[in-house]
Every structure is written in structure tokens, then in C-alpha cells.
Amino acid sequence: MIRDWDITETNMGRLSEGRLPEVVVLSTGALEPHNRHLPEGQDYLHTTHVSRTVVERASAAGAAVLWLPTIAYGVDANLMDFPLAVHVSQQTLDALLEDIIRSCAAYGIRKVVIINGHGGNDFAPLVRRLQTEIEVHLFACNWWTVGRDQYAEIFEEEDDHAGEMETSVALALYPHLVERQRAGDGVSAPFRFEALNKGWVSTSRRFIRLNDHCAVGRPHAATAEKGHRYLDLVIDRIAHFVVQLSHATVDDSFPMQEQN
Ligand SMILES: [Zn+2]
């Protein structure tokens, strides 16, 4: 069966007959170490699952939406002390996204959702600039934050990198790729400054200075069931947004509330 929502499966005949999508979903990941027990493709794998399932559910609910393949590479300059991070600069990522978005815009597609799955990637400046240059509205989310308000209901501890949430997600989606017996404890050194620990001031951490296994967050309490619960919550929320976005009219006040 050909899935029309997947650009790699649909064909020109179908695209010519049917309506072109209202919304395109593009996602971004990374190739990098995640403690010693999770796959290097973790951010690529979970983000591909999230974005595909979002599009599949939104499409089933009536959205005219098209999934584009995940960009596997991410910004990883601060993890390169560990094997094997593949670092791509933000400028390179932005240039690639811009070309893809301009291609979509050439076909009249005016709504693009970027689902990001790696903390090192930051598309906010691209979104701000590009939608003032071309007739496209860009929306971006870091999918792992979408269910933050329910986080404490599901998980015992906060996760930053390769901890309870990410290990739970991996156990839910690809348990055969999780080597739990290899996992380090995920305990990392705090900053020496209160301003950084409280988050009033931010910086970028060189991960080798945190611990010897490239992890921030303890994986021990992870279960597949927790992973499924969190993924379901996040995917439902983003899919609901995509359905609303698909049906929305791009008028002069879009995306703001209509004035009466
Ligand atoms: Zn990750």
C-alpha cells in the first residue's frame, strides 16, 4: 500500500491528481554518543518515529500533510571527545533546511513544521529570518519538551541526555539496540556557578567535563512502558496541532487569533 503522506512512497501521478499538501513536516536529529548503552543514531531514530507517527495520525484525522525524511546529522561540536559524534555546523543545517523549505514554497506550500530531536540544534533564528523573506510560515518544536507538564507523572527524574526518558523511549521503540549492561550511571558534575545551575545564565557544555560516559541523567529507572506513555502524549499533541494547521486559512492575521 502506498502511503500518500510519505514523500518517498507517493508518486507524481498521485501528487498531480490529488491536492498538494497544506503542511510539510521535516525533522532533524543527530549522530552522537548517548551513554554507552544507546545507539549512536538515537536522536535520528526516535525523531523519525515521532515525525512519521505524527504525520500518519494527522493524515488519518484529515490533514493534508507530507512527511519528508529526517536529517540525520546535527550540531555536535561539544561531544567530539567521545566516539563517534558527527558534527555538522548550524550554518550547514540552516542552509540545507532553507533549500528544502524554498523547494516546498515553490509549489505553494506555505506551512512547514520542523520537529527537532537534538538539543544542539537551534532553528529559531532561521525561522525568524526565512518567514520574512518568503511566503512560508515555519513552526518548530523540540519534541522531547512537548510533554514537559506531564513529565513528573511518568518519570522519576529529569533527563538531559541519555537518561531515564531517552532510555525509556529507546526501550519502547528499539529494545534490541539497547545494551543496558553497558550503561554508566549518568551522574554528572554540576556547574561551579549558581547562575548556571539555576539556568539564569546558559553556556554550552563540553561533555568530557561532565563524566566519562557522555550522559546527563540516570537511566536506571527507564522502562518501555514509560517510553510508550511519553511518546503517545507527545505524538498526539503534535498531530493535533498539524491537523489544526492543515485546516487553517492563511489570511492577513495568520497565525494570530482572528479579530472580530
Ligand atoms: Zn538524544
Image (spheres, rainbow, N blue to C red):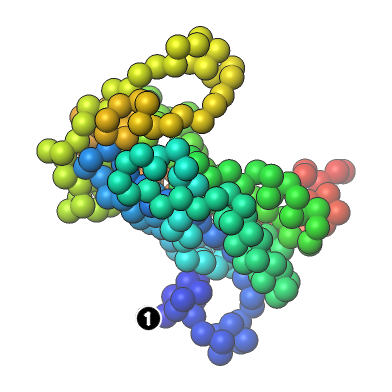
Task: In the rendered view, tell whether residue 146 sits above or below residue 101.
Answer: above
Residue placed furthest toward the top: 194
Q: Which of the two residues, 77 or 247, is positioned nearer the viewer here? A: 77
| Mark 1 residue crowding within 10 angstroms, few (<14) / some (14–19) / many (20+) | few
Give the residue number, with chain letter if any, for mark 1. 1
* Residue 81 position within the rendered picture, expressed as x and y whole percent measured from the top left: 36, 39
Q: Is residue 250 above or below residue 116?
A: below
Q: Is residue 73 left or right of residue 154?
A: right
Q: Residue at x 48, y 36 (%)?
A: 145
Query: Looking at the picture, how far across and down is residue 62, in whole percent?
Result: 55, 65
**Quadrant occupied by the N terminus:** bottom left
Amino acid at dot 1: Met
The location of residue 79, given as percent across then percent down, is 40, 40
Quarter of the image holding residue 163? top left
- In the depicted view, which residue is nearer to us: 224 or 86? 86
Answer yes or no: is residue 228 visible. Answer: no
Q: Which residue is most to the front?
A: 81
Q: Secondary structure at mark 1?
A: loop
Q: Please tell me which residue is depicted at 15% across the width and 39% down the height of the picture.
A: 182
Compared across the picture, whether 220 is left or right of 74 comes to left
